[in-house]
């Protein structure tokens, strides 16, 4: 497995990421005492960090791996949206397809972290589906982009925040077919079965347990049956299921294989799924072998969970780990 050749292939790819956009905010401090007003810790403020979240974090991972990303979704016209655009610019992510809507709130998730512990999360968001005209505008922007630009793959990142409605999903999949652009999906529960005929479908184990009408056990036989059920119902080309510390499952051409991952010191699982769909989609678009996609995805996800908060893939660390793995084979 030649990681240098793979990264060169990634650098030639253009990726369109569509989905729910958000900011992940971290309010950082330390706790040394309990409040006399109520039995709660007093957090002494040390600072704050703002990072791209949701579909924007997927785009961040795409760029971190050397590819180009254009982002499509909605934000409000508020202070948070100004912060969001600044973060996009700092990551060299194309924001030309992002739709600003006055009546919507830009999603921001604020986490209070003290003494390396996650104490509280406050969500400021709006989850109602896009109105018909708003959805029409979003789709038109995608059409205009695809008519004048090359896209090697489209990633649909669904957090059930109202952008990827069933009608929008259907139209985007049809556009992928019309423009001959493969589609990769990271689904959530609400629209799970709406993603028909996509090329790469990446749920996690909890998500498939929530939607499949029979009990699933963490055995290869049970997971294979669940994978066949999903693939037959969705007619997806490749199914990729993240199994947490068990690694990754890929179901392709009626065959299921589980790729174990290395043991990691888990600090925070936030953002791991975003990294996996980003590297899985790039691997698919670059024509990598199944085992190569699995190794990259496992290492990328493992790298993310070792760090606190939503972070992007470190390309140099990934390359180093790939070289070490390859040398051991």
Image: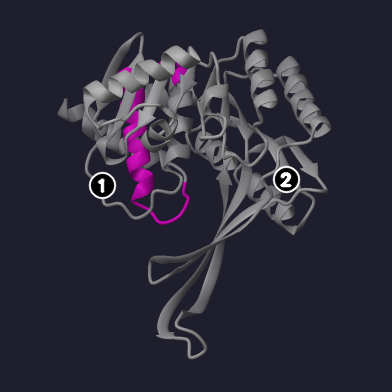
Mark closest to the chain's N terminus, 2 or 1: 2
For the stretch drawn in magenta, the main secondary structure is helix
Residue 316 drawn at (x, y percent): 38, 40
Q: Identify the residue at horizontal 50%, vertical 38% (top origin).
A: 61
Residue shown at 53% from the left, 29% from the top: 67
Q: What x and y, as percent, mark residue 18?
A: 63, 31
Query: 95 or 251: which is nearer to us?
Result: 251
Q: Are marks 2 and 1 in contact (CB under 8 Å)?
A: no
Whether residue 305 appears in magenta in the rendering, the answer is: yes
- Tell me the SS state at disc 1: loop
Q: Is 296 inside the magenta-drawn segment?
A: yes
Q: Nearer the viewer, mark 2 or mark 1?
A: 2
Disc assigned to residue 75: 2
**Which image quadrant for residue 33?**
bottom left
Is any atom of residue 13 visible in this view?
Answer: no
Span highlighted in magenta in the image: 284-311
Identify the residue at horizontal 65%, vertical 17% (top origin). 150
Judge by depth and name the residue closer to the eye, 62 or 237: 237
Q: Quadrant of the C terminus?
A: top left
The residues tagged by marks 2 and 1 sit, at their Cα atoms, a distance apart of 35 Å
Q: Which residue is mark 1?
A: 264
Color scheme of the displayed model: one colour
Residue at the (45%, 19%) spot, across then down: 284
Q: Quadrant of residue 227?
A: top left
Visible residue check, residue 181: yes
Q: Is residue 196 left or right of residue 246?
A: right
Give the side of residue 83 with respect to residue 1, left or right.
Answer: right
Residue 240 x/y as whole percent: 39, 25
């Amino acid at each position: 497995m030649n990681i240098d050749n793979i990264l060169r292939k990634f650098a030639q790819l253009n990726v369109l990421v569509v989905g729910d956009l958000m900011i992940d905010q971290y309010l950082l401090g330390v706790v040394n005492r309990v409040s006399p007003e109520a039995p709660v810790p007093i957090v002494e403020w040390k600072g704050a960090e703002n990072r791209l979240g949701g579909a924007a974090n997927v785009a961040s991972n795409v760029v971190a791996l050397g590819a180009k990303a254009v982002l499509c979704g909605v934000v409000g016209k508020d202070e948070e949206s100004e912060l969001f655009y600044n973060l996009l610019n700092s990551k060299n992510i194309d924001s030309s397809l992002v739709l600003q809507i006055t009546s919507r709130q830009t999603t921001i998730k604020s986490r209070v972290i003290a003494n390396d512990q996650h104490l509280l999360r406050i969500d400021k968001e709006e989850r109602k589906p896009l109105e018909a005209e708003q959805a029409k505008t979003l789709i038109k922007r995608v059409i205009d982009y695809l008519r004048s630009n090359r896209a090697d793959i489209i990633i649909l990142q669904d957090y059930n925040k109202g952008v990827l409605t069933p009608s929008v999903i259907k139209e985007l999949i049809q556009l992928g077919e019309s423009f001959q652009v493969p589609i990769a999906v990271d689904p959530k529960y609400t629209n799970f079965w709406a993603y028909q005929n996509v090329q790469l479908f990446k749920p996690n184990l909890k998500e498939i347990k929530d939607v499949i009408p029979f009990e699933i056990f963490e055995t290869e036989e049970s997971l294979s049956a669940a994978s066949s059920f999903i693939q037959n119902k969705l007619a997806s080309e490749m199914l990729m299921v993240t199994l947490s510390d068990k690694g990754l499952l890929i179901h392709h051409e009626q065959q299921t294989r589980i790729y174990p991952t290395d043991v990691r010191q888990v600090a925070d699982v936030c953002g791991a799924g975003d990294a996996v769909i980003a590297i899985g989609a790039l691997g698919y678009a670059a024509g990598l072998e199944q085992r190569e996609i699995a190794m990259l995805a496992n290492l990328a996800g493992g790298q993310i969970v070792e760090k606190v908060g939503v972070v992007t893939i470190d390309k140099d660390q990934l390359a180093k780990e790939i070289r070490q793995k390859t040398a051991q084979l």
